[in-house]
Amino acid sequence: MASAVVILLAAVPASAAEMMQVTFVRHGESEGNASGLIDTSVPGPVLTEKGQQQAKAVAQLLGDNNYDGIYASSMVRTQLTAAPMSQYLGLPIQVLPGFREIEAGIYEGTPEAEAAGGYALYLGAWMAGQLDMRIPGASNGYEFNDRVNGALQTVYDNGDRNAVVFSHGGTIMIWTMINAQNLTLADKIKLLTTASLDNTDYVVVEGNPEDGWVLLDWNGQKFGTQPTLSSQVQMQFRTLQRQLGATTDDVVAAWDSHDGTAIATAANRGLADAGFSVIKFARAVNAAVIKEVAGSAAVPATTDSEEPVVPEDATTETGTEDTTETATEVSASEVSASGDAATQETATGNTEDEVQAPAETDYQAETGGSASPASDGAGADADVTASDGADGTVADAGGSGSAESTTDDSHAADAGVEDTADAGAASDDSGGDGADDAGSAAA
C-alpha cells in the first residue's frame, strides 16, 4: 500500500513556478545621446530636459498597472527615469546592476555612426544565437544573458510578480531576442529594423526564471496570448494583499517595541499606506476594465468572407538628436556577422541597491558614491541603500542636497518625485539603418 502511494506521488508533476510579468522601460533621453558617442560607463550621463518630461509621461502612461516592484540599473539615467513612477506608486527604486547597458569594450567612446562595423555586429550575432561571440574588452553573449537573468531571479525571489524595470535599449532588445520563446528570427529582424525602442518605449514579457519567457507586448505590438481581465484582477489582488501584509507587519513590529510614540506613528502611517494601497488597487482594476471594454469595442465583427482587421505595426518616432542604444535596428546581414573574440571578461554582480525617490527634485550628476536630491517641496529625501558593495548612484542635475547612503535592506516607499531627474542617459535609439542604430544606443 505504501509503495503504491509513493508511486502515485511520484507520478504527480511538481508544481510549476509562479508566473511573473516584467515591463521593461527604456530610459529617457540623456545628454549622452546628443554626444554621438557610445557611452556604456557607470554611472553615466544624466537626462536632458526632454528626458525628464519623458520620464513623467511614461509614469502617467503605465502607472495604473500598479507594479509591485520598481527596479533600475546602476546607471543613473535609469534611476532618474524611474523616479516619477516611484512617486506615483509610492514605492522605492531598487537598483540591480544586472540591468545595466551592454558594455562596449574597445568601442567605448567611439562614434555611434561607426557602430555598424563593430559594436553592433556582436549584438546581432548574439541575437542569432552566437552567444560565444565576445565584444573585445567586454562580455560575450552568455555573460550578458546570465547577468540579466540573475537580476530577474532577484526580482522573482523578492516576491514581485508585476515588476517594472527601467533599463537600456540594447539590454532590453537583445535580452528579449535571446529569450523570447515565441519569436522567430524573422520576427526579431522585423522588430529591430522597424520598431527599435526609442526613449521610454517599453517591452512586456511573461514567464519565470525556471520555465523561460514569452513576449507579450513590444511597445504596443501584441504577441502571444494576452492576459485575461480575470488574471489581471487576480494579480492586482495579490499585490494588494502583499502591501497590506507589509503594513500590518510594520505596525506589529512597533507594537512589540512597547514604545508609545513608535506605536502611534506606525499606526498613523499604516492607515495612510493601507488606504493608498486600496486606491491603487481600485485604480488598476478600473484601468484594466476600461482597456478590456475599449479593446472589445475596437474589434469589428468578421464573417467568413471577410478578412479580420489587423492593426498596423506600431512604429517608433525618433528624433534626430536621439541615438540608438544598442542593437536597435539589426539587419539580416548583421545577424550573421561575427567578430574576433577578446580575452578580457567583465565581472558582473547582481547586488541590489534601493533608491528612494524624492519629491519635486532636480538632480545633479555625480560620478561615484551618492548624491541626494534637494527637495523643493514636501518630498522625502532620496535614500540610496547599497548592499554587498554595489553602486547605487543617483545623479543630480542642477539641484543640491545629499542622498543618504545606508547599508540596510529597507524598502521604505516614501517616493515622491514630480520633476525628477536629469538623469539617466544612456543610449537612445534614434534610428539609423541596421547596425548603425544598433551600436549607437550606448551614448
Image: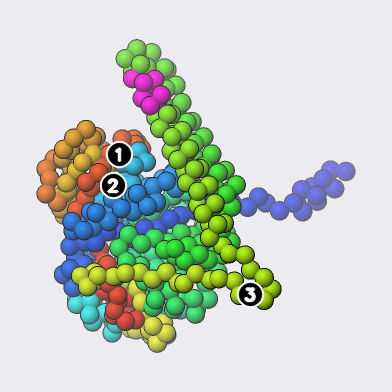
- Percent of width and height locating residue 404: 21, 38
Residue in the picture at 53% in, 60% down: 298
Element type at mark 2: helix
The correct choice, above or below, for 184 with respect to 169 in the image is below
Element type at mark 3: loop
Residue in the picture at 49% in, 43% down: 286
Q: Residue 142 colored magenta?
A: no
- What crowding class fits label 1: few (fewer than 14 Cα within 10 Å), some (14-19), or many (20 or more)? many
Q: Amino acid at mark 2?
A: Ala
Q: Residue 271 colored magenta?
A: yes
The correct choice, above or below, for 371 with respect to 316 in the image is above
Looking at the rendering, in which quadrant would you find the N terminus? top right
Mark on residue 415? Answer: 1
Q: Nearer the viewer, residue 257 or 128?
A: 128
Looking at marks 2 and 3 on the same chain, the residue that comes earlier in the sequence is marked by 2
Q: Amino acid at mark 3?
A: Glu
Q: Is residue 405 left or right of residue 317?
A: left
Looking at marks 1 and 3 on the same chain, the residue that comes earlier in the sequence is marked by 3
* Label 2 to label 3: alpha-carbon separation: 47 Å
The correct choice, above or below, for 281 with respect to 368 in the image is above
Which portion, as a residue range, is magenta? 265-272
Looking at marks 1 and 2 on the same chain, the residue that comes earlier in the sequence is marked by 2
Marks 1 and 2: CB-CB under 8 Å? yes
Q: Amino acid at mark 1?
A: Ala
Residue of label 2: 83
Q: Is residue 199 left or right of residue 5?
A: left
Q: Nearer the viewer, residue 14 or 265?
A: 265
